[in-house]
Structures are given as C-alpha cells and as structure tokens.
Image (cartoon, rainbow, N blue to C red):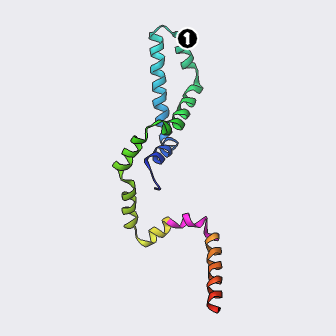
C-alpha cells in the first residue's frame, strides 16, 4: 500500500497550507483558555498564557507531531475504506495516456537509473556469454 490515510494525515499536518490553519485554531484555543482562567480568578495563569509567545509555536508543533500517532487505527482503517485510495489511484493511472504515465514514472526511476543501466549491462553480457557456449 503506497498511500494510506495515516500517511495523508502526517503529510497534511506538516504542509505549509495546513500549518497556518492549525496555528489559528491553537491561538483561538489558547485565547479561550485565557478567558476561562480570568473568569476563574486565576489572573496570573491567564497572563502567563497571554504573555508566552512561544506557547503557540510549541503547541502547534507538538500537535503536528503527536496527532497521527494518537488516533486509533480504526479511524485510519475507516478513512482508507471510505476514500478507497488504492482503487481510485489505480483507476486514474489506468486512464493516463502513455506519455503522461511515463512522465509520472520517470522521476521515480531516475534516481536508480545508473543502477538499472549497470544491471542491464551485466545481464546483457551474461546472456551473450550463454549464447556463445
């Protein structure tokens, strides 16, 4: 399985598009916490939260790191089965024209291109040797 819900969530949590959204949500939560502490008469705690600018960064980073590992496997299994990623991607790849399919795969094999050429050369030499015998 190449693409799973767990991998999608992990990638989403560190994406530059999602980080500002998460940061705004955490900031909103911290602001609500400040109000709760103020209303409870704990002004020192409320002030400490409001004055700590690193708290937002630390909390956002921690959520991005921990969340994928804290959700139950059943959650990921449900998303995998609902999205049906394997079949969806397989269908889309099957409908790609050959030129587009080649452009999609070329970067994957490009990093191993020298190894593939070397193995092909060795197999060619072995095949030639076997034919001479």
Residue that protrudes farthest toward the bottom in the picture? 132
* Up/down of 25 relative to 99, above or below: above
Residue 106 is covered by the magenta coloring: yes
The residue carrying mark 1 is 44
Q: Which quadrant: the C terminus?
A: bottom right
Q: Position of residue 72 (x, y in %)?
A: 43, 38
What is the x, y in percent for residue 17?
48, 43
Viewer-closest of 88 and 16: 88
Q: Quadrant of residue 86?
A: bottom left
Task: Indicate whether 33 appears above or below 60.
Answer: above
Q: Nearer the viewer, residue 133 or 109?
A: 133
Could you tell me residue 100's position as x and y percent? 45, 68
Q: Residue at position x 51%, y 9% from top?
A: 42
Percent across and percent down for residue 31 are 47, 21
Q: Is residue 111 magenta?
A: yes
Q: Is residue 116 above or below residue 72?
A: below
Region in magenta: 105-114
Circle 1 SS class:
helix
Residue at 45% from the left image edge and 37% from the top image edge: 71
89 left or right of 103?
left
Q: Quadrant of residue 132?
A: bottom right
Residue sitting at x 47%, y 56%: 2
Q: Which residue occupies the extreme left position in the image?
A: 82
Circle 1 residues within 10 Å: few <14, some 14–19, many ≥20: few
Residue at left offset 54%, top offset 37%: 65
The secondary structure that dominates the magenta segment is helix
Residue furthest out toward the top:
41
């Amino acid at each position: 399985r190449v693409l799973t819900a767990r991998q999608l969530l992990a990638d989403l949590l560190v994406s530059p598009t999602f980080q500002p959204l998460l940061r705004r949500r955490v900031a909103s939560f911290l602001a609500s916490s400040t109000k709760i502490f103020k209303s409870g008469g704990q002004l020192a705690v409320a002030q400490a939260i409001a004055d700590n600018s690193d708290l937002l960064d630390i909390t956002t980073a921690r959520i991005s790191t921990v969340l994928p590992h804290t959700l139950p496997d059943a959650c990921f299994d449900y998303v995998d089965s609902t999205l049906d990623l394997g079949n969806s991607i397989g269908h889309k790849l099957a409908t790609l024209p050959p030129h587009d399919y080649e452009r999609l795969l070329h970067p994957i094999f490009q990093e191993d291109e020298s190894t593939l050429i070397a193995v092909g050369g060795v197999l060619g030499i072995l095949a030639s040797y076997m034919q001479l015998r």
